Amino acid sequence: MNSFKKNLLKKRYNAERRFQWYGKIAIGLALTFLAVFMFQIFSKGYSAFQKTWIVTEVHYDKELLLIDAESPSKDDLENADYYDVAYKAMTSLDPGLPEEEDRQLIQMVSYKYETEVKDLLLKNPDFLGKIVPIKLTASDDVDQVHKGNYPRDIPEKNRRVNDYQLQIYDMLNERGDILSEFNISFFTSPDSREAELAGIASSFMGTVFSILVCLAFSFPIAVLAAIYLEEFAPKNKFTDFIEVNINNLAAVPSIVFGLLGLGVLLAVFNLPRSTPLVGGITLSLMTLPTIIIAARASLKAVPPSIREAALAMGASNMQTTMHHTVPLSMPGTLSGTIIGLAQALGETAPLILIGMVAFVNTIPGTPVDPAASLPVQIYIWSESAERGFVEKVSACIMVLLAFLILMNLAAQIVRHKFEKKWS
Amino acid sequence: MNLILVTFIILLAFTSYYFGRKKALVIQSSQRLTALPKFYGYYLAAWCAAPALIIFALWSVFEPSIVKTFILQDYTDQNLTKNELQLIYTKVKALAAGTYTGNITNFLDESANKYIQLKGIANSAKVAIILAILILSLSFAYRSVQKNDRMREPVEIFLKWVLFVASLGAVLVTIGIVFSLLFEAIRFFQAVKIFDFIFGTHWYPAKTFVRDGQPDPELMKDAFGAVPLFAGTFFIAFIAMCVAIPIGLLSGIYLSEYAGRGVRKYAKPIIEILAGIPTVVYGFFAALTVGPFVKEIGNAMGLEVSAESALAAGAVMGVMIIPFISSLSDDVITAVPQNLRDGSYAMGATKSETVKKVIFPAALPGIVGSILLAVSRAVGETMIVVMASGLAANLTMNPLESTSTITAQIVVILIGDQQFGDPKTQSAFALGISLFIVTLFLNVIALSVVKKYREKYE
């Protein structure tokens, strides 16, 4: 072989190797991005599952509480004045502090500390008149300092926690009076303007209600439509039109469905704004084509021999479909439905348009109560400037992703466990 | 009230099912049944529920507008515009519900009383008519049950109609989209010339403050030019495609042609996770991590970079789109017949030469289709742009500056309380319809390209 040919061959093999590397690099880049992304979310978010408490002592002094009765009833405790008692509990941390500087200590706990003082006494009425230790929710600034998310060595005026507060914090920390515990209230409390108190309960319930409403509306209609199109529809222009329509609907941007919800559900039908009911209906319109396509595919996968056998036994078309084809296609339809719902679950834009971004600090009990949803909560929190919300957003994302993974797993299980393999 | 009525109808339908079945068993003792007993039940139940529910639905749809016409009849001699009439009607309704807080005129009070009266009449009429229909249809159905007519066929025809109506659902949604968008958009284009909207280069809807109850037409002319938004949308989509096409296509090719079974089995689903992550999460990531990162790199290179650069939003959007392109192109490449590959290898071509010169051209229509679908997704993507790109509509081609898109502006305009009838709110619908048209156009082309390609090899 002459050297020219040899060189050419070498060149071609090099090109071959290069091309393979391009492919590997492309896949590597995609996987790297996923890894970086997951790492970022987890490293930022895991600390939100920890809650910081400040331990101090409270003296339930009857005089300060303005309780006159000898053995006060529950109502007396309920109506007592806790302001002074709570105030004293915090200021006792540094008795030497001049009175006008007291605010600095108060700012170290959440603004709801008075309620916490009250709740402890309501739970244990025999604490009245005694001095007892109490856990108070630390403010989000102290919380962030404790979690190491705030740099401490920058100039004081750029810090949200001043030198004095840091000093108190260090003293408490040394005494072991700063506690870190699993943050249950993140899961049980509704949204709040204060990062240390904000939880996902309201948006979680909003998501659950929206998904249920979405399922209730989209699943029956989609399955019935799929049955008609696959089993009964005559082949004509109109059914072709319906088909094209469904395919195009599946690719319409989600925000357009939001406009539909706003322009029709809210403006024409006057359904209540900001509620999971409207959100769920809007999402169901979006999920409808997804489920129809999945259901049709799984109906198509049922072999004709099943139908022929049923027809041969004298079943009518409707009986063949309802007794044999549809039940056999259910696993595929259900897993398609779950995947469609998982998509709807992560949708944000249409819900924003129908007003589910309103600040809701109650936990909704029904689908017609105002609520947010998990993705919208992520949006709301990520728009707020406070540092404490960054970890909350990441934690909320973790909850949302866990939800999605569970749903996709469920879809896989339904498909693999119940689907019949025709061979 | 309505709830009770519907529950009553449904309960009655259930009862009539059992009643019909029982009746069939009685008939059985004297003559041969024409169908299984349950069909007698279904027949009765269908006749009970369907007519009543249809009438109920029609009534609920038409009642409000009829009541409205009656109320507003009293105001026809006052020469009011449509908007003013609407306002009066809202006031009347609020007054009737006891939630009105403005000052109450005699006339308004009268109308509210009339409204309550009309509502009362309408309600009792509704109940009476539905009860009458229930009795009529049930007695008709019961007579055919008694006569032992054929029972299965009508039930199946009824079911078929139910299925057909359900399949119209998708069409209804499309009609709903088109009409809700068109309705508001047409009103918008009455206030703003369509020419100014499509060719204007300034988008600044906040400028249209209202003067004397009417927006200033001079300002309006200059506030709703959508060119910056269209440009921004396609610019960000272009950046996204610059990221997604090479990575998606190359990984699709690698997965379908080179990767071993093991790699394919794990890499493919892992890449597809990227498509399952909600867009709001990408938005957060773009705003918090990628945006500042791009800014830092740019500043280190001595460039002026906005924290909300188009580059950051576009790049993250591109990552989101990678799996669309990779799995779709994987599918079309796998669908290329094996004999094309074999022929190329037989001529001594290497694998990459086969891919580049034989498979890629053969799969090209499918790949183009998948890219068009991906573009349509990028154009319609909302949350990433809202969170990571700017909200001010700059007409720029610099990826380091911030720019805005159609979707982002829709969200900006409609977040919070909207006032219908305000040109600013209506402009969101005009944007919505242009977005709908653009994505529809892309989808139709993509689907027809993919379809054409499929026919070639089957």
Image: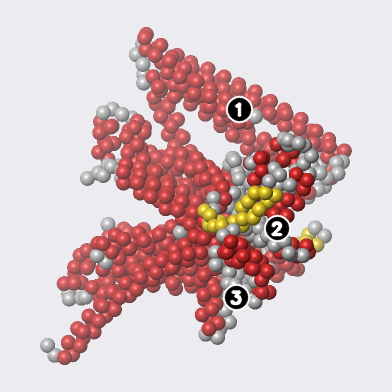
Give the alpha-carbon distance from disc 1 to disc 3, as whole Å: 70 Å
Amino acid under disc 1: Leu
**Depth-wise, is mark 2 or mark 3 nearer the camera?**
2
From the viewer's perspective, is residue A315 above or below residue A265?
Answer: above
Q: Which residue is mark 2?
A: A92
Which badge, 2 or 3, comes first in the chain's sequence? Answer: 2
Circles 1 and 3, Cβ within 8 Å, touching? The answer is no
Instruction: Say yes or no: labels 2 and 3 on the same chain.
Output: yes
Return the residue found at the far top: B30
- Camera-side residue of A141 and B393: A141
* Left or right of residue A418, residue A199 in this image: right
Amino acid under disc 2: Ser
Which of the image's four quarters has the N terminus of chain B? top right
Pointer 2 chain: A
Which of the image's four quarters has the C terminus of chain B? bottom left
Helix, strand, or loop for circle 2? loop
Pointer 1 chain: B
Residue A59 image point, x, y percent: 70, 49
**Depth-wise, is mark 1 or mark 3 nearer the camera?**
3
* Left or right of residue A15, residue B97 in this image: right
Instruction: Say yes or no: labels 1 and 3 on the same chain.
Output: no
Q: Is residue B112 visible?
A: yes
Task: Give the image quarter of residue B185.
Answer: bottom right
Residue A379 image point, x, y percent: 57, 59
Q: Which residue is mark 3?
A: A153
**Depth-wise, is mark 2 or mark 1 nearer the camera?**
2
From the viewer's perspective, is residue B145 above or below residue A135?
Answer: above
Which residue is at a point 35% across and 36% down the rendered structure image? A327
- Camera-side residue of A66 and B67: A66
* Left or right of residue B145, residue A122 in this image: right
Give the alpha-carbon distance from disc 2 to disc 1, as whole Å: 64 Å
Q: Which residue is mark 1?
A: B5
